[in-house]
Image: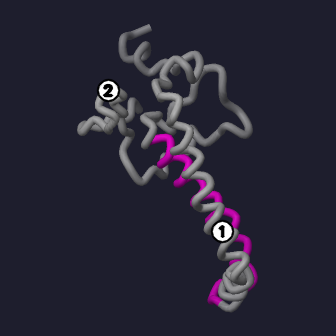
Amino acid sequence: MSTSEQQQAPPGTIADYDERSNGSWVISFGAAMIPFAGFLYGHGRGMTVRVVEAVVRSPLGPAGLLLLPFATLGFEKCIYDTAQSVQGINPNMRPADRGGFPSGGADLPSFSLVPIMKWDNEKRSFIRQPIQPSI
């Protein structure tokens, strides 16, 4: 096996590359709960019905409703990939002990809004130079 192939080998488990502190769960929690709370707020205000009506009345017509699941899955992947990148985890990295359904997100392109960051526990801040993806 060549040197480049050894560097591309996935880690055995998440613990092999996860250097987060115990408080990093707050980022994942916020990344999941803020959009969910926004959805609940909008749903309570009748936004769901307005979105469905707007899609049906659009040039796409009722067939446009078939695009809604793909759009919402894209938003979900964007939020997940961004949260992982902020925590310093490459969303395209798949450990050897993971894979298959439903963990197939690493096979798709990253929808992250920020580059992969590295957290400095001593300074309690992000390192200015983000980590570049290994792929």
Residue at the spot of label 2: 122
The residue located at (61%, 20%) in the rendering is 96
Nearest to the eye among marks 2 and 1: give it: 2
Residues shaded magenta = 58-85
- The image quadrant that residue 50 belongs to is bottom right
Query: The residue tagged with tag 2: helix, strand or loop?
Result: loop
Kindly indicate whether the residue at mark 1 contacts the one at mark 2 (C-beta within 8 angstroms).
no
Q: Is residue 10 above or below residue 119?
A: above
The question of residue 80 being in magenta is answered with yes
- The answer to whether residue 132 is visible is no
Residue at the spot of label 1: 39
Name the outermost residue toward the left: 128
- The image quadrant that residue 63 belongs to is bottom right
Q: Nearer the viewer, residue 48 or 28?
A: 28
Left or right placement of residue 40 versus residue 13 in this view: right
The residue located at (55%, 20%) in the rendering is 15
Q: Residues within 10 Å of mark 1 (few under 14, many from 20)?
A: some
Q: Nearer the viewer, residue 76 or 67?
A: 76
Residue 5: x and y, percent? 43, 16
The residue located at (74%, 83%) in the rendering is 49
